[in-house]
Amino acid sequence: MVAKAFDEMTAFGSDIRSGYEFVNAWLAATPPELLRQRQHEAELLFRRIGITFNVYGDAEGEERLIPFDIIPRVLTRPEWDRLSKGLTQRVTALNMFLKDVYSKAECLKAGIIPEELVYRNPYFRPEMQGLSLPHDIYVMIAGIDIVRVDAETFYVLEDNARTPSGVSYMLENREVMLRLFPDLFAKHRIAPVENYADELLNTLKSVAPRSASADPTVAVLTPGPFNSAFYEHSFLADKLGAELVEGRDLYVRENTLYMRTTEGPKRVDVVYRRVDDDFIDPLSFRPDSVLGVPGLMSAYRAGNLTLANAVGTGVSDDKAVYSYMPEIIKFFTGEEAILKNVPTYRCREPDALKYVLENIEELVVKEVDGSGGYGMLVGPKSDKATCAAFREKVRAHPEKFIAQPTLALSTCPTFVEEGVAPRHVDLRPYVLSGADGVRTVPGGLTRVALKDGSLVVNSSQGGGTKDTWVVDPPVLPTSQAKIKTPVVSAAPAKEIDHTQQTQSQS
């Protein structure tokens, strides 16, 4: 039986949920023609700004705009506070876990997680073992992908602990909404996100090496203009007031990193890198890389450089390791996980394997090191022959797979071609960890599946984004709290296409 989706504005009925009263009143008072005009103005603004992305493998290789929806996604302050607490707990545990696996490995000795899942992980970097990092922080910038299934339940889909992307869209979405609807911001208490760049810069400077000056120099390392997220790299460098550099702009001398400038060499203390581990230093990793800096790791090991995020953080966002996060959180913090994992069957375990093989048509099965929607089976959307073939793959190498049930993701009102209608969403909040603590940016990036019935939120497959508002309820007088919704009520959720669970850019 197909589950009915929870609508974040109307729940499972027609009464307006707390926090959405003013959205309901605004939609009821705004003619569709005006909404359409504002949607067109938003597109023009994004074109003028030049916020684009590239799709790898696109034959035409053209830059695209990510579609933007002008109806905000709303979280009340209590909802956000609960999320924020869970995010802080999770990222704190991730940093403790990474420090441990690269030093004493106490969680492995205690049997919290099997050793082979760490030491045989393709993202585990032996070069990091025994290396002391400033303040023991490995993940300075985390993007935690979250979905909602009812009023109280949020699930973490994925922990992005390497180079999480998308924050530029969060900031530009807010800028466009402020221009188009200043009256809404004037009337309601909406938490700001504009201070993210300041918070990020403070975070990066706080973890500078001890040998840095009182005002550490920060640089953003990009693979270059052909990278799909290059716009974001240049955007963040500009917001941070930092230099945007490629590998050829940097060099290492006497275990210290320098940047070439018109005024001569300048020491770099912190590198916010958007280059993967394999490519950052051809002397330590891939010798054919032209994206990195020869000797970068020597400066890192000498304690003269901080990399954000640290090398080797990918071991913590592996799908098999993800399945142990509740146990990892309990081991390192002594607390139960506030944010739930999607229930996960580890096929390496006999009982789980038996269940998966018997129920593969109802499950989503993924390779533990897969990404981008590859190496996976969406059972409810696959024919019997495909399921049978995948069953044999799992049977042959169970340690390479995990499986999850389908989820009925929440919907939010969205302005589409036929008017206002519910569409499925996810959320990527951003979490900053520095020497002075953990910060969460209120809201984050909401991604929306714009196609009717689709649960794929990725921009490369037609997904768009929304501004995410954290508001202090009530936003309208109590007498208006039961206005009926003018939007199309939530449609039954089709079986989830879990492609979205693996296509979040890291």
Image: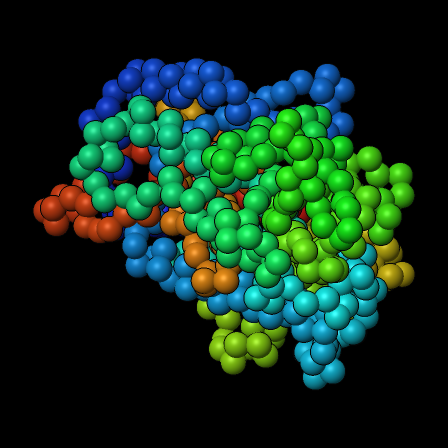
Q: In this view, does 78 lie to the left or right of 340?
A: left
**Foreground of the two, 490 or 106:** 106
Question: Which is nearer the eye, 502 or 8?
Answer: 502
Task: Please name the residue shown 30% across and 15% down the image.
Answer: 33
Looking at the image, residue 75 lies above or below residue 44:
below
Q: Toward which corner of the image does residue 56 lie, by quadrant?
A: top right
Could you say which quadrant of the image residue 398 lies in? bottom right
Left or right of residue 11: residue 311: right
Where residue 3 appears, as percent x and y from the top left, is: 49, 51
Residue for point 76% across, 40% down: 251
Spot occupied by residue 310 in the image (x, y as percentages of width and height): 66, 56
For the point 71% across and 20% down, the residue is 61
Vertical placement of 128 versus 268: above or below?
Answer: below
Question: Is residue 391 or residue 246 the one in the foreground?
Answer: 246
Q: Can residue 374 be seen in this view?
A: no
Residue 100: x %, y % from top left: 67, 73
Count up the numbered dots: 0
